[in-house]
């Protein structure tokens, strides 16, 4: 592990400890997710080349953080958060692009019909794209990205940016009985299946060890990891595109 990654992981764990303190004190829902859960399952620690951390939270936890810890959560496009995925940070006012942060994926309840609308609606996609272009820093195709950002604001001036709150609101907009848990993410049909959670998983939290800490995750870990990474999720894979820095830096490498 290089020095930069090692230091970033130390910072992430400091932030994670702050997050755990809040959740444990207030009995809030959270679960390890994606690469963070994968690292915990394999070796009870972060994946060696990871520079980000992923957690699932529910709407109650999300609302609690916004109301009671506004300095620790970044969730608006104007706060350098171009995706419908909030960030937990030590202090919002001091956050910069090189600082460590935790990606929070909000679970909401909806219906398959509304989910299909969210993932396929051209208007939702435009709003998501406009939000994704609302940034001061681009890591790849910098000149082209800045031109796209300008054109996006010019041609889609009539459209609002897609925020986490708006994504949740859209998914909740149904008169039918809500029977599907969904991890709020980028509105893309190919992401839909992997971000649907079976109801029983939500209610089966268990405690596991991660970086010498007792933490929570949704019960059926192996089934969930297979859903996200395929049947060979136990096998470590690394190539020159493996390193991941979090969703803001999605195009960095």
Image (cartoon, rainbow, N blue to C red):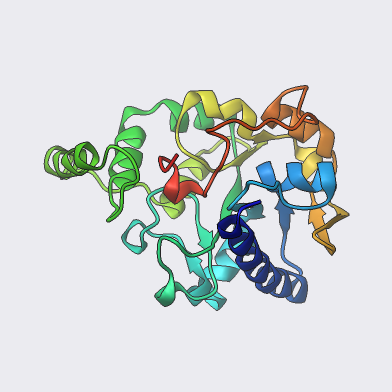
Counting the numbered discs, the total is 0
Image position, residue 201 (x, y; %): 79, 41
**Residue positioned 80% across, 60% down in the render:** 211
Residue occupying the far left of the picture: 154
Q: Nearer the viewer, residue 204 or 110?
A: 204
Q: Is residue 222 above or below residue 105?
A: above
The answer to whether residue 89 is left or right of residue 160 is right
The part of the image, by quadrant, that contains residue 20 is bottom right
Q: Residue at x 56, y 41 (%)?
A: 243
Q: Quadrant of the C terminus?
A: top left
Residues 1 and 230: in front is 1
| Apparent side of residue 135 relative to residue 214 in the rendered image (left or right) | left
Please indicate, yes or no, whether residue 109 appears anywhere in the rendered image: yes
Q: Nearer the viewer, residue 222 or 239?
A: 239
Q: Position of residue 196 (x, y in %)?
A: 65, 33
Q: Does 160 appear above or below 187? A: below
Residue 46 image point, x, y percent: 72, 51
């Amino acid at each position: 592990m290089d020095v930069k990654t090692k230091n970033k992981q130390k910072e992430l764990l400091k932030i994670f400890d702050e997050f755990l303190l809040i959740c444990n004190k207030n009995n809030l829902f959270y679960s390890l997710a994606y690469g963070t859960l994968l690292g915990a399952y394999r070796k009870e620690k972060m994946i060696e080349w990871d520079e980000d951390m992923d957690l699932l939270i529910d709407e109650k936890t999300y609302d609690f953080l916004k109301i009671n810890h506004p300095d620790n959560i970044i969730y608006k496009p104007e706060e350098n958060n171009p995706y419908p995925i909030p960030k937990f940070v030590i202090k919002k006012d001091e956050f910069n692009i090189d600082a460590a942060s935790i990606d929070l994926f909000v679970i909401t309840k909806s219906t398959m019909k509304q989910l299909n609308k969210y993932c396929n609606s051209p208007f939702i996609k435009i709003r998501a794209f406009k939000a994704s272009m609302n940034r001061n820093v681009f890591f790849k195709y910098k000149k082209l990205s800045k031109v796209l950002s300008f054109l996006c604001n010019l041609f889609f001036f009539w459209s609002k940016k897609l925020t986490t709150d708006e994504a949740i609101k859209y998914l909740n907009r149904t008169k039918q009985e809500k029977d599907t848990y969904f991890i709020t993410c980028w509105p893309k049909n190919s992401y839909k299946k992997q971000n649907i959670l079976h109801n029983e998983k939500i209610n089966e939290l268990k405690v596991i060890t991660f970086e010498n800490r007792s933490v929570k995750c949704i019960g059926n870990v192996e089934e969930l990891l297979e859903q996200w990474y395929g049947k060979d999720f136990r096998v470590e894979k690394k190539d020159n595109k493996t390193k991941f820095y979090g969703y803001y830096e999605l195009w960095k490498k």
